Amino acid sequence: MTGTRVFVARLTGSGVFDPAGDRLGRIRDVLVVYRKDNAPRVVGLLAEVPGKRRVFISIGRVSSIASGQVITTGPISDRKFEQRGGEVRLLAEFLGRKVTFNDGSGDAEIEDAAIEETGPGEWAISQLFVRRPRQSGAPFTKGATALVPWALVTEKTEAGEPQSAEALIASYSELRPADLATTLLDLPQERMLEVAEELPDDRLADVLEEMDESDQVEIMAQLDDERAADVLDEMEPDDAADLIAQLPEERGEHLLGLMEPEEADDVRLLLSFGADTAGGLMTPEPIILSAESTVAEGLAMIRRNETAPALAAAVCITLPPYEAPTGRFLGMVHFQRMLRYPPHERLGSLIDPGLEPISVDTPAAEVSRILASYNLVSVPVIDENHRLVGVVTVDDVLDYLLPDDWRSHDDEDTPASAAMSKRAPKKRPATKTATAKPATRGRRG
């Protein structure tokens, strides 16, 4: 292995491969320990392997590190990660700390760190990419940057003090919501809540949708009511309804009053149905068009970036009004059928005659059977007046069928997987109260 310099912020998300080239997981962080007279030494890498499990890879089991991949000497341990005393995670705890230049030229903030091989199987921090305070009063200017050896600066931050929340958020800016949610839950509780408070409303909404309800409640309890309502506005209505149902009734009603009226109406509608019915599972914002709309208009609607893939699989055709609850429901047109016809073809002539809508009180078990039996991605939901009120998508049903802890579910927990089909129906508590439980933390054996 030749000497290599790798910047830590660019390493996150890189693939981990065994000598045969088989992918084992992805890098999530780098762990170092401080030394008295030398730069911090790298002790290992934190990797995410299939099943969202976080595991520790000793640096001695790494044969090569590059900006795009990490090669190990062989299989890695599947034991859960637990951070030991004295270890510091560079991305989660180090970037963003303050340093002062030993020559007296001022202070700076660490934006990245370069690790470099110092010997066979040995790596250490070699240089820091830092930014000095801005000198101009202009609001959009930034301070000068510099790449400096570790020996030329001294940390102003105490060894155990974490970085700023802003620096951590910047480090994880490109993570998908599900990955960011898992990363936040790996942090100490106080740190997780601090970072959550600093996330933009839409980003925090996406992250909350990927968390267990107990973790959602824990975070929402730390937000003031105005911020909490703004985050709920950004969430999908069915996710927002499930979250509000777990809050104390008085706060839930107060937050609904602070939300945008249109968003709050969708959530109130979902809360009026049982969680184990089509009405409780459905998404109240399907794509709705008139029978006179054309294939071109339908394809334009499903191409929108904000449309979820499951909702983009079909468009619903109704009489006016074209917002749920609509006029009389006429049918659905699947996107594959639209692709087979010219752009000017009327959607009313392409309706699937074999797809029957379901009522709001259809049991969730029956909904899942319908989707499976007819190989559907979504099924329309109507009320007693045959008005479209929403659609149940396959991901809505999966979320209902999977165990409550499926996001932290490990491959080794096979009994839970075997019992998945026998789980008790998910129900929204009648009292709308919930007790937040501590987030599950990983352990390294």
Image: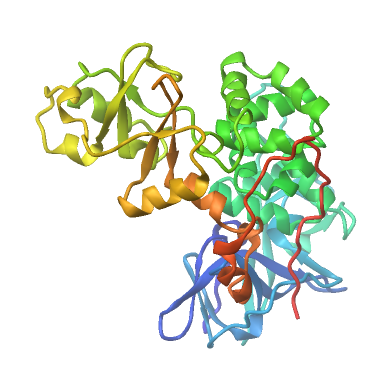
Pinpoint residue 85: horizontal percent, then vertical percent: 86, 71
Query: Could you say which quadrant of the image residue 160 lies in?
Result: bottom right
Work out whether 256 lies above or below 58.
above
Q: In which quarter of the image is residue 422?
A: bottom right
Relative horizontal placement of residue 335, taking residue 193 as reference (left or right): left
Left or right of 382 on screen, residue 234: right
Q: Where is residue 414 in the image (x, y as percent from the top left)?
A: 59, 75
The residue shown at (62%, 74%) is 415
Quadrant occupied by the C terminus: bottom right
- Between 304 and 267, the one lying in front of the other is 267
Q: Is residue 226 visible?
A: no
Task: Residue at 23% x, 39% y: name it.
Answer: 354
Q: Looking at this view, is 263 or 390 the one in front?
A: 390
- Residue 385 in the image: above or below residue 21: above
Residue at x 28% of width, y 38% of height: 355
Rendered position, 383 above or below 438: above
**Total number of numbered labels?**
0
* Towards the viewer: 134 or 122: 122
Residue lying furthest right:
158
The reply, left or right, for residue 366 in relation to residue 120 is left
Q: In this view, does 345 lie to the left or right of 134?
A: left
Work out whether residue 399 can be spotted. Answer: yes
Q: Which residue lies furthest to the top in this view?
A: 320
